[in-house]
Image: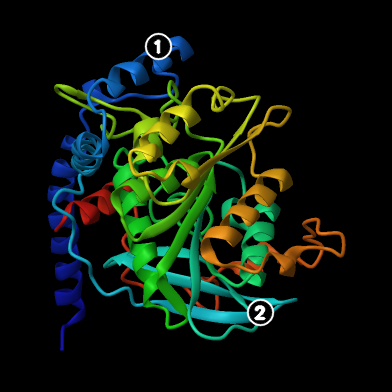
Amino acid sequence: MMTKHATTTFAVCFITMLLLFNRDAYAQVDKSQLCQGKYWTEAEGKEKLQEFATSYHDKESWETRKDKIRQNILQGAGLNPMPAKTPLNPIIRDKKIMDGYTVENVAFESRPGFWVTGNLYRPAKATGKVPGILCPHGHWDDGRFRDDMQFRCAAMARMGAVVFAYDMVGYGESTQSDHKNPVLVKLQTWNSIRAVDFLVSLKDVDAKRIAVTGASGGGTQSFVLTAIDNRIAVSAPVVMVAAHFFGGCVCESGMPIHKAPGFQTNNVEIAACAAPRPMLLVSDGDDWTKNTPEVEYPYIRDIYAFYKAANQVENVHLPNEKHDYGISKREAVYHFFARHLGLNLSKVEDKNGSIDESFVKIIPKEKLCVFNADHPRPAKAITGNEAVAALFAGK
């Protein structure tokens, strides 16, 4: 049995070791290779796509290009080699019975000492294995607690899926690191990979029908995860895929996943790595996705055509709408996921066949938190930007 002094000494040594690892974590961020925000003009973005297209002309040559894109993401994010997959040690508690679905508060360890926090929405009645859907969120206040997040998670659960809504680092309950950590691309991408692991570990989830959808920064998480993890069978990045815009936050473009010496790509090509898996692009007329019908969507559709799967990618463009995950965008995703995941759309339709979310009851934030005074975060949790970055630098 360790004495109090020995325990304190061990803790100090452990933190010191983590901080030494931290030097490597920060060193991997090569700022000269970063492509951030509106890195190109709209015209330049379109020209770059034409330039990229000269490097492939069929399925085989695209596959070569895709491998380079995927390897550059992994290398740039510091995920090559991948960290060891340690036990998830999931916590699932506080089940709430709703109208046609249930909600549970969830946490699991993506790395020893770091907890991914979220909510698990399940159909109230289901038989056999059902699809699993990941729902990352964007840079909006209240994150996974927002009404629009609860609407879409509840609706897709009522349609017959197990849905996991989880916090971005620095949002909601994920306060072990703030959202300006220089290695946030690595942290969030790894958390999403482990979120897939968590979903497929559930007895009621069909590992062959895993999907992901998010808007804005959640859209970035969606298409990056789909590009590097073939377990994602269906994806729907919302209001994010653009030829000239690379994401304005450190969690999207704070590590060199788009560029390396002698190599350049963009979010359109990363999204195209989903081919031939079904993908829905949702765009609007008031942000960087305003050109999607004429620029990004045709480009991606041409890549899908290499697989004879051009009908597997779709674009719903809402020219009079803004940057959000509002009802029209959710409706588009519900229809797409119903077709490709075998969900029951009638569960969220009224008698006229229109989408009706009125059955959803918004749950207060405090009832969706997995950690609270009665159930505190485990004492072994690592906190602070440097300590967390060091933790993720370990193998």
Q: Is residue 378 visible?
A: no
Residue 96 is tagged as 2
What residue do we see at 49% from left, 44% from top? 311
- Amino acid identity at mark 2: Lys
For the residue pair 144 and 238, the one nearer the viewer reads as: 238
Where residue 13 sits, quadrant-wise, is: bottom left
Where residue 120 sits, quadrant-wise, is: bottom right
From the viewer's perspective, tell me whether residue 281 is left or right of residue 207: right
What residue do we see at 50% from left, 85% from top? 128
For the residue pair 149 and 378, the one nearer the viewer reads as: 149
How many numbered discs, if any? 2
**Cα distance, mark 2 to mark 1?**
50 Å
Q: Tell which tag, 2 or 1, sits nearer the viewer.
A: 1
Residue 186 drawn above or below residue 231: above
From this viewpoint, which residue is outermost toward the front?
Answer: 308
Q: Position of residue 93 (x, y in %)?
A: 53, 81
What is the secondary structure assignment of the residue under circle 1?
helix
Q: Position of residue 31 (x, y in %)?
A: 24, 25
The quadrant in which the C terminus is found is bottom left
What residue do we see at 39% from left, 77% from top? 90
Where residue 11 sits, quadrant-wise, is: bottom left
- Amino acid identity at mark 1: Glu
Residue 340 drawn above or below residue 228: below
Q: Position of residue 382 (x, y in %)?
A: 31, 61
The tag earlier along the polypeptide, 2 or 1, is 1
Which residue was labeled with disc 1?
Answer: 44
Q: Position of residue 138 (x, y in %)?
A: 53, 44
Q: Residues within 10 Å of mark 1 (few under 14, many from 20)?
A: few
What colour scheme governs how the chains and residues are painted in the rendered image of this protein?
rainbow
